[in-house]
Amino acid sequence: MHKHHPGIYDVVIAGAGPVGLFLACELRLLDLSVLLLERAEIPHSPLKRLPFGMRGLSVPTLEALYRHGLLDEVIAVQRANDAASATAESAHWMQRPRPAATR
């Protein structure tokens, strides 16, 4: 909250996806008060994981992650989490192997 006005924030961010979370961290480094809102009841939504999660990162966010030396780590952690939790049946439909073509 704002130092001089409790209950008032310098910035309100809608969405706790990769971009919203990173933006909140960057703004806190600048000593701004941040309120981060997330509509999803389940924060581990498939839309916030690969392949969509990484596609959801904007170019400026990717550049900021790279500048901070975090991009490779973010990608590695995301892939490790997906590999640990995904099986052929439980994997997101875009991550499942394609069936062989029949003629």
Image: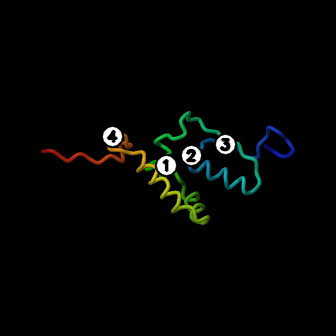
Q: Residues within 10 Å of mark 1 (few under 14, many from 20)?
A: some
Q: Is residue 7 above or below residue 30?
A: above
Quarter of the image that includes the N terminus: top right
Residue at the top extreme, as displayed = 41
Q: Which mark is residue 53?
A: 1
Q: Earlier in the sequence, mark 4 or mark 1?
A: 1
Callout 1 touching callout 3 (CB < 8 Å): no
Q: CA distance from mark 4 to mark 3?
A: 34 Å
Q: Earlier in the sequence, mark 2 or mark 4?
A: 2
Q: Earlier in the sequence, mark 2 or mark 3?
A: 2
Quarter of the image that includes the C terminus: top left
Q: Amino acid at mark 1?
A: Gly
Q: Residues within 10 Å of mark 4 (few under 14, many from 20)?
A: few
- For numbered disc 4, what is the local secondary structure? loop
Q: Which residue is mark 3?
A: 36
Q: Which residue is mark 4?
A: 89
Q: Which residue is mark 2?
A: 17
At a point 60% along the width and 61% down the height, the residue shown is: 64
Residue 61 as seen in the image, left or right of residue 32: left
Q: Amino acid at mark 4?
A: Glu
Residue 39 as seen in the image, left or right of residue 100: right
Q: CA distance from mark 2 to mark 4?
A: 25 Å
Q: Amino acid at mark 2?
A: Gly
Q: Earlier in the sequence, mark 1 or mark 2?
A: 2
Q: Earlier in the sequence, mark 4 or mark 3?
A: 3
How many callouts does the rendering have? 4
Nearer to me, 28 or 78:
78
- For numbered disc 2, what is the local secondary structure? loop
